[in-house]
Every structure is written in structure tokens, then in C-alpha cells.
Amino acid sequence: MNLSQAFQNFFAGRAKYPNFKSKHHRQSVQFPQNVTVTSESAIKFPGSLGVVAAKIHRPIEGVLKTVTVSKMPDGKYFASLLVEDGIEKSESSSEGKAIGIDLGLTDFAVTSDGSKFANPRHLKKHECNLKRKQRKLSRKKKGSQNLNKARIRVAKVHAKIARAREDFHHKLSRKIVNENQVIVVEDLAVKNRVKNHNLAKSIKDVGWGQFCTMLRYKAEFEGKVYLEVGRFFPSSHLCSNTLLPLENMDLSMRSFVCPHCQERHDRDINAEINIRRNEGLRISASGGGAAALGRDVRPKA
């Protein structure tokens, strides 16, 4: 099944030619049948594995299909249970409160209702500890047991950073989905943005892609609308009151006075009102078929 899917992704242009799994780093094995959850603290596998103690995070409701056991780089084991619960997908509706979200680095998210959520900077909090452990790892002899022990210590720090980031994304995405019916974000070209070597580390640390993925599946599960506005939509260069164009502003300018309406705007909030009201709601009203404003705009060479 995995090989078939890998070749389908290759011929569709979504992935490279399939390779054999590496014996290093993350390992996984799938059990498509004969696996049962015996209690709240154990899973029974076929063959010699038998009953394995586990922490079951939620009750299993439905038919258990496939269990994937993964060994992470830090040495911990996780079991992912695929369950067919028979619950039909909720019908999508755009009736309700709409919100636009601007994702950034100074503030992780700025919403069109004026709320700002600070960037936690998870990597920066653990950077000294990570640097110290990586320095020790670099001094170990290649192929030795001490090198493997040092590698696990580094992997544990990376795992802690990843868990903290994921926890923040889950909580914020759940809050936004619970409070709004239509969620509009900008289509971020993360792969292009990390080419800026001055910001690449900060962009990877903030995790925009993971956050947007969580927003999407949580909104779709509850029958809410998730929309992405084209990356070339000039959200920062339109007045949210008059919809008239503004002069190009340097990134250091965080607020400005509109020459048309003479009102002072916060740059991020002004952009979010444009994304939500002027573009997101227009796309929602047109059923998503209309092209975004500025579709013929191309980045400068």
C-alpha cells in the first residue's frame, strides 16, 4: 500500500522517486490487522510482540483499522491508531462571524478584530541548551556508543521544542475555530521565504504551515469555512476604509496615516481587515470560483 501510494505521488509530481526506508532516525512499522486495544493501558499486537503497555489518550470509538508504531529519534515509541468511526462530515456553512489572520514573526498572528498573539520563539528559549549538547555531540568519536548517547540527548531537546510548538498551535487554532465561522488566511509561500538567510531560522521555528494545517482540518471537521487569499493580494497596500491604494511602505513602518481618509491605521490590523472583508468574504460569496484581486501581479525579477 505504501509503495503504491509512493509511486502515485511520484507520477503526479508531488514527490521524488521512492527510496528504501533509512535504518537511522525515525522508524515505523504498520499492522493492518489483528491489533486490539485490551484496556486503557495496553495494546495487543500479533506475533511475538504480544501485549505492550501504552498510554491511551482517548477512548477508541469505532472499528480499529490500522496501527502504526513509530520510534522517534529521541528513543520514544508512539502508536497511531486509525479508526473508522462512521461519523459523516459536517456540511459547510459560511453563516456567522468571519475573521482574517495575518501570520508574522514579530507577532505570530494578528486578527482582523484587533487581537495580537505574540510569537513564543520556542527555539530561542532552548537555544543555549541545544548549542551546548550539539557541541558535545561534535566531539564524540564516530561510530562510538558515546556518540549515540549524545545524539539522543540532542534529539530530546529538538523533541521538546517540537512538542511546545505543536501545543501552542493546537490551542490557538482551537480557540480561533471555536469563536469564528469563516477563517481567512494568506497563502504563504514558506518555501520561497526561507531563501532569505537572515530570516530562514525564524520562519522555520514559527511553523506557519503546521498551524494552517490545523486550522484547515479543525474548521472542515466542524463544517466551518477555511479560505486562503492569494499571496499577491496587496493587503498591506490598500486602505481598509476607502479601498484605495497606498504608497509602498518599509517593513519598519508599523502604523501610518492614510492620505485618503486621514485616519491612522495599524499596518497589521489594516491588512487583516482587507484580507477578511475585502477579499475573503468576496471569495466566500462567489463560491471560491472568482480569481483573487491582483491575479496578474508577478513578483519582481
Image (cartoon, rainbow, N blue to C red):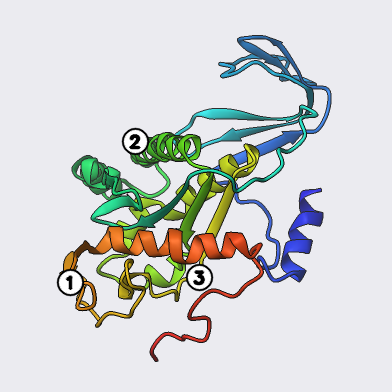
Q: Secondary structure at mark 3?
A: loop
Q: Position of residue 22 (x, y in %)?
A: 60, 51
What number is the disc on residue 262? 1
| Rendered residue at 69%/71% (across/down) | 13
Q: Amino acid at mark 3?
A: Gly
| Rendered residue at 42%/54% (across/down) | 100
| Rendered residue at 17%/69% (across/down) | 256
Q: Nearer the viewer, mark 2 or mark 1?
A: 1
Out of 88 and 76, give the one closest to the viewer: 88
Q: Which residue is mark 3?
A: 230
- The answer to whether residue 191 is left or right of residue 168 is right
Measure how far apart labels 2 and 1 are at the Cα level: 57 Å
Measure how far apart labels 1 and 3 are at the Cα level: 28 Å
Q: Nearer the viewer, mark 2 or mark 3?
A: 3
Out of 76 and 217, give the one closest to the viewer: 217
Q: Secondary structure at mark 1?
A: loop
Q: Is residue 299 above or below residue 86?
A: below
Assess disc 2: are there few (<14), some (14-19) or many (≥20) residues with their C-alpha within 10 Å of its C-alpha. many
Assess disc 1: are there few (<14), some (14-19) or many (≥20) residues with their C-alpha within 10 Å of its C-alpha. few
Q: Is residue 107 above or below residue 247?
A: above
- The answer to whether residue 266 is left or right of residue 51 is left
What number is the disc on residue 153? 2
Residue 62 found in image quarter: top right
Residue 93 found in image quarter: top right
Q: Position of residue 190 (x, y in %)?
A: 43, 65
Q: Amino acid at mark 1?
A: Gln
